[in-house]
Image (tube, rainbow, N blue to C red):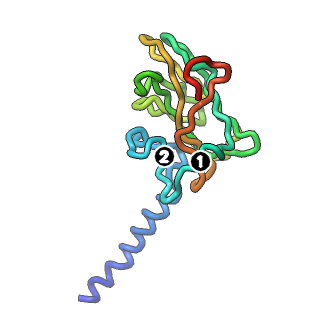
Amino acid sequence: MHRQIGSYRAPAFFAFMLVFLSATEAFPDGAPADTCVKSRTNEPNHGAARSQSLSTLPYQVTASGNVYGPGTQIQVTIHGHQDVFRGFFLQARDAQTNEWIGSWYETPNTKTIPECSSVTHADNRDKEQATFVWQAPKDRQGQVYFTGTIVKNYGSYWASVIAAVPGALGRHH
């Protein structure tokens, strides 16, 4: 009997290591679509790592506006100044209803998650800046805000970041 149990140890160990190693390299090509509906909103699945305090955020996230009409385009930028970042996950939300709204233009280094009006990185290379264009729905108007996560590395990220809108009146972020 011990012989049979022992014969399963090696394959089980290798299967465990394969799962463990794949988890430690999680999502080098961006957040998966299920990020939109996780219990910890905007939090990547990075093992035991938890979000850093927003008061220590070394990045500037800005939006060119927060009021939209049918088809309006708004530019959102993440700027690292002295700190590079490897990943991001941003989504657009209606300021009144908090529902996901609009769509993002996909660029060569991004991928979109249309199911929840989100954009994420398409590679995990160091980035100093990233700029995105969001498009409002063609049949609505209102206020929008942009929220998400900026990832410096696997163990250091900032969740629930909200883009600032320089000079905007109304809802301040």
Give the left or right position of residue 159, taking residue 82 as reference.
left
Against 70, is 103 above or below? Answer: below
Is residue 122 visible to the viewer in this orientation of the structure? no
Give the left or right position of residue 28, taking residue 117 as reference.
right
Q: Tell me the CA gap for discs 2 and 1.
A: 13 Å
Residue 15 horizontal/vertical position (percent):
39, 68
Q: Quadrant of the C terminus?
A: top right
Frontmost of labels 2 and 1 is 1
Choose between 13 and 35: the one closer to the eye: 35
Secondary element at image label 2: loop
Which residue: 52% across, 14% down?
68
Against 18, is 130 above or below? Answer: above
Give the number of marks.
2
Against 48, is 135 above or below? Answer: above
Which residue: 45% across, 16% down?
137
Identify the residue under disc 1: 53
Identify the residue under disc 2: 43
Secondary element at image label 1: loop
Q: Quadrant of the N terminus?
A: bottom left
In the rendered structure, which amino acid carries the disc numbered 1? Ser
Residue 113 horizontal/vertical position (percent):
45, 33
Residue 107 horizontal/vertical position (percent):
58, 30
Callout 2–callout 1 Cβ contact below 8 Å: no
The outermost residue toward the right is 82
Which residue: 53% across, 26% down?
145
